[in-house]
Amino acid sequence: MTTITVYDPAMCCSTGICGAEVDQRLVDLTADLDWLKAQGVRVQRFGLSREPAEFAANDTIRQIMQASEGDDLPVFLVDGSFKAKARYPARAELAEWVGIADSAAAPAHQASACCGAASNQSAVSSGCCGGGAKGTAETEKAGSCC
């Protein structure tokens, strides 16, 4: 079984998706890692503030942190081999690393009559974005309803 290991910077919780201002990259990563688990990939995620011993125990991580004074987190390893640092990869890249076909890496919700940006106005007026009265300004600012 393929294992992807993520070494996260210090965060307030295990995923970083808590608090008043959530980083969308962390939300996406959490969803992508859950998706990988559903595909049969083993996922390990270590946070610097919660599991510092895991960082110290891995030679690759220790060298990266010493060279950058910790600024190159997160770090991604697949079966112990370095794949990326200082950024959050997209689902398609994660899938490529673990050998999952590109078509399987497509986002869970494809653009449709409701979710496509081109049909935004009809989606809002039809109420498929949470009940029509959900304010078009919010939807227009986002660029699409989903």
Image (cartoon, rainbow, N blue to C red):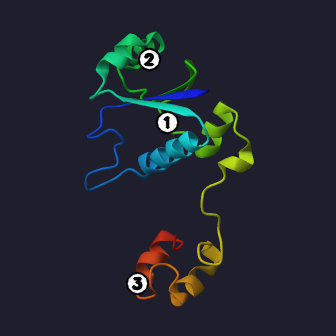
Q: Is residue 81 above or below residue 105?
A: above
Query: Where does label 1 land, which residue?
Result: 87
Viewed as shown, does residue 32 lie left or right of 69?
right
Q: Which amino acid does label 1 sit on?
A: Arg
Query: Could you tell me which residue is drawn at 69 percent across and 38 percent down?
Result: 100
Report which residue position mark 3 lands on. Answer: 135
Q: Say whether disc 3 or disc 2 marks the residue closer to the N-terminus.
A: 2
Measuring from the top left, give residue 5's x and y in whole percent: 49, 27
Q: Mark 2 points at which residue?
A: 61
Q: Nearer the viewer, mark 1 or mark 2?
A: 2
Q: What element carries label 2?
A: helix
Dot 2, how many residues are within 10 Å of its Cα: few (below 14), some (14-19), or many (20+)? many
Q: What residue type is labelled 3?
A: Gly
Calculate the distance from the C-alpha at mark 3 to the C-alpha at mark 2: 47 Å
Q: Which residue is drawn at 66% across and 53% down?
A: 106
State which quadrant residue 84 falls in: top right
